[in-house]
Image: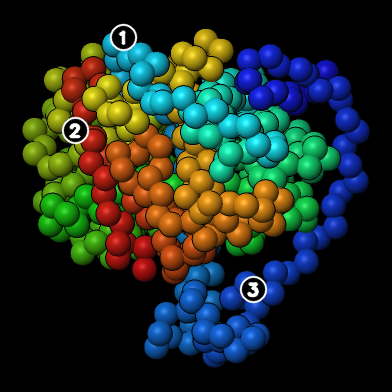
């Protein structure tokens, strides 16, 4: 049996697809002549003579290309950070809201779609020996069920969803993408994929839009028709944005001493913190260091106002113990994957930390109430938490943008045009933060990134999050 599934309109009965032979390796995608990197150096106009909006006034095309390529190289090194940190989306402690009082009323007034179907695809790494992202696909299906029953589908069109598990391998990721091409879907969604560029290559050749929740690989940032709906650099930029907001002038990044972490920290981390007006240094600590007191002690001479910790839960626990032991009063930001079972071994637990996360899972948020209700109604028993939230949010976010654009042409080309023309649209479960895929969010890095914002929240001693704040990334990514 294939990992692919076809989900009918009611999103409840699932028919597994028979295994299709993998299509021949697609030919190399032809260059998109609208790509500004293909324009003549020194020109601010495209080949029709119209001004190129991707090039800021007063800056030559060649300067813009060089700056963008430099940023893409830095951003691509950061693509491995989530894998280095945890190998999965986020901790179950990261703000899972109370769903006990959430009813179907949170879904709003019924507004069933009845028009001709539009077909979407969703690719997830799914369940493998290393990870279990099964609930991500269930989150995507819940978003489709909710949209078809309550949001009028996509501008009245009933949405059909085809899913596939990539299993974090290049071969299966390529196979999933080929299945989407054969199925004739209008767009493909994904959270993050371990082998994202395998999907990019196939879908770009077929001119099918690919929408990630987050992606910072070289292919995802440079290939036309591929989008990261949320900020893929948030683990670095959100902490820097927080430092800027709080006027913190010295920052130390505490990272695992492996190239996949220290490389991005020394390159991208330094750039965003410098742009935030903070002196920046990297404190690399070998993995498995049980007592980091000497390392943290060595950093105190510079009187840092902020520590940003990037590591898995065990690494973070050791770092936080040392910080508490030394009585450090600086602010501390951590990635949500830091939160695990080690809080009880830290004096005061996780209380007082500022946690960088990708979703706002707060029971008081109407968006979360709708998510919880949709998961109960259409989520096939999946847990209402971060993993399901990834699939739900990127799928519903795409639907919101297409509806905001009032899409009429549901072909892949029409879907791509609608996404690019959509106004700023609230991204689900991000506290009102918006995304806009017109190339304006991070012009210095890539037109494929649709948002420069990040989310930071307060943690209690057990790692439960509250007081979510949207952090503006303006000026951080220049």
Q: Is residue 308 above or below residue 407?
A: above
Rendered location of residue 391, percent (x, y)? 53, 31
Using the image, tell me which numbered label, if any, was put on residue 221. none
Quarter in which the N terminus is drawn:
top right
Residue 8 is left or right of residue 153, and the answer is right
| Residue picked out by circle 3 | 34
Residue 458: image quadrant is: top left
Using the image, tell me which numbered label, if any, was put on residue 100. 1
x 58%, y 39%: residue: 156
x 65%, y 85%: residue: 47
| Residue picked out by circle 2 | 467
Residue 357: image quadrant is: top left
x 23%, y 41%: residue: 469
In this view of the protein, which residue sits in the foreground, 339 or 95? 95
Mark 2: secondary structure: strand
Give the tally of numbered discs.
3
Cα gap from disc 2 to disc 3, whole angstroms:
42 Å
Residue 180 is left or right of residue 220, and the answer is right
Mark 3 packing: few (<14 Cα in 10 Å), some, or many (20+)? few
Residue 370: image quadrant is: top left
Q: How is the image coloured?
A: rainbow
């Amino acid at each position: 049996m294939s990992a692919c599934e076809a989900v009918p309109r009611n999103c409840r009965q699932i028919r597994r697809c028979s295994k299709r032979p993998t299509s021949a390796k697609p030919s190399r995608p032809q260059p998109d002549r609208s790509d500004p990197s293909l324009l003549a150096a020194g020109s601010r106009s495209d080949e029709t003579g119209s001004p190129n909006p991707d090039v800021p006034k007063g800056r030559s095309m060649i300067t813009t290309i060089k700056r963008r390529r430099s940023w893409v190289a830095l951003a691509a090194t950061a693509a491995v950070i989530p894998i280095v940190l945890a190998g999965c989306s986020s901790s179950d402690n990261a703000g899972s809201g109370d769903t006990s009082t959430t009813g179907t009323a949170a879904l709003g007034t019924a507004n069933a779609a009845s028009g001709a179907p539009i077909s979407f695809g969703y690719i997830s790494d799914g369940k493998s020996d290393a990870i279990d992202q099964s609930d991500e696909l269930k989150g995507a299906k819940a978003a489709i069920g909710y949209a078809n029953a309550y949001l009028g589908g996509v501008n009245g069109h009933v949405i059909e969803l085809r899913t596939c598990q990539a299993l974090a391998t290049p071969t299966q990721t390529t196979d999933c993408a080929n299945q989407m091409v054969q199925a004739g879907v209008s767009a493909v969604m994904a959270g993050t994929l371990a082998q994202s560029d395998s999907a990019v290559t196939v879908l770009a050749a077929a001119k099918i839009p690919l929408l990630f929740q987050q992606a910072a690989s070289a292919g995802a940032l440079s290939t036309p028709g591929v989008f990261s709906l949320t900020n893929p650099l948030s683990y670095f930029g959100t902490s820097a944005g927080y430092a800027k907001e709080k006027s913190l002038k010295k920052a130390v990044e505490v990272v695992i001493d492996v190239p996949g972490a220290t490389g991005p920290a020394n390159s991208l981390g330094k750039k965003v913190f410098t742009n935030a007006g903070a002196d920046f240094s990297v404190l690399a600590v070998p993995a498995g260091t049980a007592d980091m007191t000497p390392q943290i002690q060595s950093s105190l001479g510079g009187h840092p106002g902020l520590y940003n910790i990037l590591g898995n839960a065990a690494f973070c626990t050791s770092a936080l113990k040392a910080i508490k032991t030394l009585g450090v009063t600086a602010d501390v930001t951590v990635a949500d994957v830091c939160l695990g079972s080690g809080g009880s071994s830290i004096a005061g637990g996780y209380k007082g930390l500022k946690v960088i996360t990708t979703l706002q899972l707060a029971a008081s948020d109407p968006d979360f109430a709708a998510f919880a209700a949709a998961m109960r109604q259409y989520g096939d028993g999946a847990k209402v938490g971060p993993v399901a939230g990834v699939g739900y949010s990127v799928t519903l976010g795409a639907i919101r943008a297409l509806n905001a654009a009032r899409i009429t042409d549901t072909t892949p080309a029409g879907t791509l045009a609608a996404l690019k023309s959509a106004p700023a649209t609230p991204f689900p479960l991000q506290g009102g933060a918006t995304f806009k895929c017109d190339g304006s969010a991070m012009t210095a890095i890539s037109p494929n990134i649709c948002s420069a914002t990040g989310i930071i929240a307060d943690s209690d001693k057990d790692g439960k999050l509250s007081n979510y704040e949207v952090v503006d990334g303006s000026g951080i990514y220049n």
